[in-house]
Amino acid sequence: MAVLDILEFPDPRLRTVAEPVAEVTDTHRQLIDNMLDTMYDAPGIGLAATQVNVHERILVMDLSEDQSEPLVFINPEVEVLDPELGQYDEGCLSVPGFYETVNRPQRIRVSALDRDGNSFEEKLDGLLAICLQHEIDHLDGKLFVDYLSPLKRKRIRSKLEKSQRRRA
């Protein structure tokens, strides 16, 4: 297993729309294992392949306290079950150190493939539904900062660019 580099906003590669996975292979399963290692190491509760510069529709999540419940979604598709929006303070491994309130549907149905290529469907609500939508946004080339005002987004971008310059 390996810990992968996580792209940080405003890296333009984060805007790439991920391609569907045609067939789940051992290469994909290795990527999934590496993504889980990366997510746990960061630490975070979700990670999309786009964030590690792999532009395929794969994401992993684990909301458990002890990192014992990894979830894998390949080619996820979401249906909103309840249009009522919930407010959550979202953070992101690609936007480190920033948390902002985002409104998203609280109840969804997801259909996807698991790490073995088997299809499944599940109803999700609460934080699990919010996190999945956040990660799917990454696969679509979107970040949670896109839901913020242009002024807030610019402020976050400037602070991250300054931090990145200091590290370089």
Image: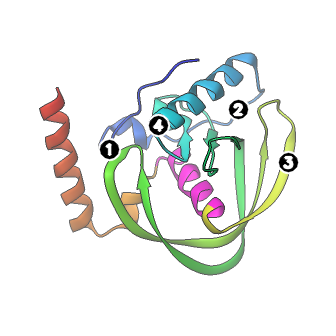
Q: Which residue is mark 3?
A: 120
Q: Amino acid at mark 3?
A: Phe
Measured in 3D between alpha carbons, the distance from the residue under mark 3 to the one under mark 1, in whole angstroms, is: 32 Å
Measured in 3D between alpha carbons, the distance from the residue under mark 1 to the one under mark 4, in whole angstroms, is: 10 Å
Measured in 3D between alpha carbons, the distance from the residue under mark 2 to the one under mark 3, in whole angstroms, is: 15 Å
Q: Earlier in the sequence, mark 3 or mark 1?
A: 1
Q: Which residue is mark 2?
A: 21
Q: Earlier in the sequence, mark 2 or mark 4?
A: 2
Picture quarter with the C terminus:
top left
Q: Amino acid at mark 1?
A: Phe
Q: Which residue is mark 4?
A: 51
Measured in 3D between alpha carbons, the distance from the residue under mark 2 to the one under mark 4, in whole angstroms, is: 16 Å
Above or below, 23 relative to 96: above
Asked if the residue under mark 3 is in contact with the one under mark 2, i.e. CB atoms within 8 Å, the reply is no
Q: What label does residue 9 carry, if any?
A: 1
Tag 1 secondary structure:
loop
Question: Along the horizontal axis of the image, is 148 left or right of 137?
Answer: left
* Percent of width and height locating residue 108: 72, 67
The magenta stretch is: 128-141
Residue shown at the point (68%, 23%) measured from the top left? 28
In the picture as drawn, the residue positioned furthest to the front comes out as 66
Question: Along the horizontal axis of the image, is 164 left or right of 149?
Answer: left
Looking at the image, which is closer to me, 110 or 30? 30
Asked if the residue under mark 4 is in contact with the one under mark 1, i.e. CB atoms within 8 Å, the reply is no
Residue 123 in the magenta stretch? The answer is: no
Tag 4 secondary structure:
helix
Looking at the image, which is closer to me, 131 or 68? 68
